[in-house]
Amino acid sequence: MAQMMRKFVVSNMCVVVGLTRRSSARSLATGKTMPVKKPDLPPEGEITKSVFMSQSTDIYTNLAMEDWMYRNMDFSNHHVMMVWRNEPCVVIGRHQNPWLEANVPFLGEKDISLARRNSGGGTVYHDRGNLNITFFTHRDRYDRKYNLEIIKRALYRSFGIKSLINERQDIIVRDKYKVSGTAAKLGRLSAYHHCTLLVNANKADLSKALAKREHGIQTTATPSTPSPVANLADLDNRVTVESLQTAIGYEYLRTPALHIDDAGERHISKQRGFQFVNPTEDWYPGIAELRDELTTWDWCFGRTPEFTVSRSFPVPAELLPSKLYSATQELIITMTVEKGLINDVTLNIPPGLIESGFHGEASVITHLKGKRFTSEALAALEDAMLTRHLTGDIRKLDEKEQFVAKCFDQVVNTV
Amino acid sequence: MPLRRSKILVKWIYENQHKMQTLRRCSSTLRYKELEENSVQATLEHVAPVEAGAPTHQPRPDTTPDISFKYDDLRVSLAAPYQLQRKPEAVDLGFGKYFTDHMLKINYHTELGGWQKPEITPFENLSIHPAAKALHYAVQLFEGLKAYRGVDDKIRLFRPELNMERMNLAAKRSGLPMFDGEELIKCITRLVQIDQEWVPHSETSTLYIRPTLIGTEPTFGIVAPETAMLFAILSPVSAYYKTNSDGAVSIYADPNVVRAFPGGVGNRKVGSNYGPTIEITSQASKLGHQQVLWLFGPNQELTEVGAMNIFLVYINEHGDKQLSTPPLNGLILPGVTRRSILELASQWEDITVKEEVMTMDRVIELKNQGRLLEMFGAGTAVIITPISNVGYLDKNIHVPTMKQKHAVYQRLKDTLLAIQYGHIEHPYAKIIT
């Protein structure tokens, strides 16, 4: 109390005096020069908490808001828990491969956004039935277990749902169903830990969006670990995204900042409480730029660690000259993709296809280099093959070329 | 036995002396008399130059009564998520259209010993008896101050202690109870801390704080109310106000309309000063002017403009640039911005600062001699509004405010904004988080 009084009555000049006095007293006592002491973090009793509720359901805006807060806010004496939800989207981790993790053509079809977040970890599917929570603290006060405990206690206190936290720090209900995903980012001054909770997500779309097709990708990118999942609403129909975020919010506010305990309603009244946030440029200058960066192809796809794709396709009999071959005639397409762009392409064309007059090789391959690993590359391939026709009339690819193009399409698109 | 009884009695008196109003009333009245004398003194002198960082030149009038609410008794009840308001787009904020999620309320009941415990509750309507004195006899007063989010992300209040003094002075006149300004500042600080996210992180918006004190006693007698309520509400405001295309306003002066009169409450921030200005302001608006210039007396003295104090910049008889504003003679509201401008400008070497009575004739004379440079209004809501035209009788007096190369008003505005947003460290801006 006396400390607070001091802050109000005297201007901030007093604080500066206080700090220098302390460090000079130390050097007097020890007789040697102390290194510049970084200011101590405030004790638990001086930390107040807020629960921010994002007004936006756009994944890019919300990820940008997370980033903005991480870069711009001071969490030394203010811990924040932000709750948010998004329109259907797939979010991959910082070092992941979107083609490996998600069914990219399906996403395009169903207008589901793809976003790459700043923190590591695995891929998640979000929709309005999914609650996202981000815990912000000072870097030195980062505590994942604390955050997950809060969620576990809230589930029990408000809905009677018992859960456990496993060694991979997932929240498991009914002993085997995962209801959360978790990822974190630690910086120099601030840290955040975010998790998602499946409340009432569309499980059918979820499995389709994350379906792994046969892809032939070899990579060192972080793979996701699939687990059986369940919606919390299936366990207790009182659970909705609103009721859950309120329950977790209150549990967060009633718990002291640094250790798990129930400090009750009285503690809640000392906090800053719930707040809506409107993550727009006027309220948070600089957020628009962060958001724009997250929507670019270069970030979502271009940041993929280097990988190699290799697929083989048996050549249909009708394209081969009538002859018996000793080995199965297979077209093997191998590509290395760096920064989302095709770097190196190798086409292993079987002798049967060459004999029947297929001409594609070197020039076709060089056309592909530097193209994005999407249908853009396929279009470039078709163009290249067309230009090889010596007579200008022919605008169509011949069957063999069509076959190669189709195989190519399969490599790029169904991956 | 008699010994023991008197000891207990003495102990009881010692512990409860603060509740015995009758013992202290005369000393409060004495203090108020001193206060009035101080303010009369000040009007007769020039403003003395002040060093930056030095305490204010006037001794702070002691408006602290002995009985007040205390910040330590504050009870907070935070709003639940369903009670919160969604935040609008920052461009839609306007002034006083949107309010935050919480409010501060402190009740006063003479029957219960005076001020009750302060509380912060979710924002809600008031339930008020139809006979409440505030509704009939304007037994009320209000204040206006702002909280700014600085460049270092810390929130600052601008000279809140001046608003507290002003509130107490106004309370006295209407029989409303006085209180300890420091305690109210602490309560408001907690309120701002809770609703902090209502202050955008950009420099174009601020949080406007409106403490109000109303007499709620439900009887028709025109006497001091026995019950009252002090409440404070917050409104996020954007910095954009309606002006002409060049950013200046045109004002209208009608000698037949009077805002305040000697012996009245022109120098107090009470609602009854503002309601009756609505008709003339809308008439002025129809004639193409944005504000009304309030004149007084047979000499057409300039007093205030709209809800702001008025300033003029002109070349005086010695050939120096002079900044003038009417003195605090009872007709003028002692604005916080006004006072800050006088104190800041007094430190500049290239300008003379003077509190003097200005008349319309003087203004016209200066204009005709080409010596009138600038005219502007100053107040918490807009900080500074430059004036480019005065409509008076049938004439339009054009003031070359916007044509000045190194305009005084711009320099003052920039300095005040720099202090408020923490670009410059200054004792005027009090950090509260």
Image (cartoon, grey):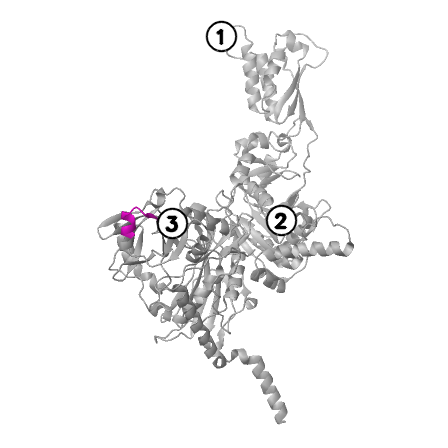
User: In the rendered view, would you say A25 is above or below A336?
Assistant: below
Pair 3/1: label in front: 3
Look at the image and tell me in which quarter the C terminus of chain A lies: top right
Percent position (x, y) of residue B383? Answer: 42, 52
Residue B370 part of the magenta segment: yes
Mark 1 is surrounded, within 10 Å at the Cα level, by few (under 14), some (14 to 19) or many (20 or more) other residues, namely few
- Mark seen at residue A393: 1
User: In the rendered view, would you say A41 is above or below A331?
Assistant: below
Image mark 2: chain: A
In the image shown, does B282 or A265 lie closer to the viewer?
Answer: B282
Q: Are marks 2 and 1 in contact (CB under 8 Å)?
A: no
Residue B384 shown left or right of residue A172 in the figure: left
Q: Are marks 3 and 1 in contact (CB under 8 Å)?
A: no
Q: Check disc 2 and report the residue beneath it.
A: A135
Residue A216 part of the magenta segment: no
Distance Cα–Cα, label 2 vs label 1? 64 Å
Distance Cα–Cα, label 3 vs label 2? 60 Å
Q: Which residues are magenta?
A: B363-374
* Residue type highlighted by circle 2: Phe
Circle 2 — which element? strand
The answer to which quarter of the image holds residue B308 is bottom left
Distance Cα–Cα, label 3 vs label 1? 89 Å
Q: Check disc 3 and report the residue beneath it.
A: B320
| Whether residue A237 is visible | no
* Residue type highlighted by circle 1: Asp
Circle 1 — which element? loop
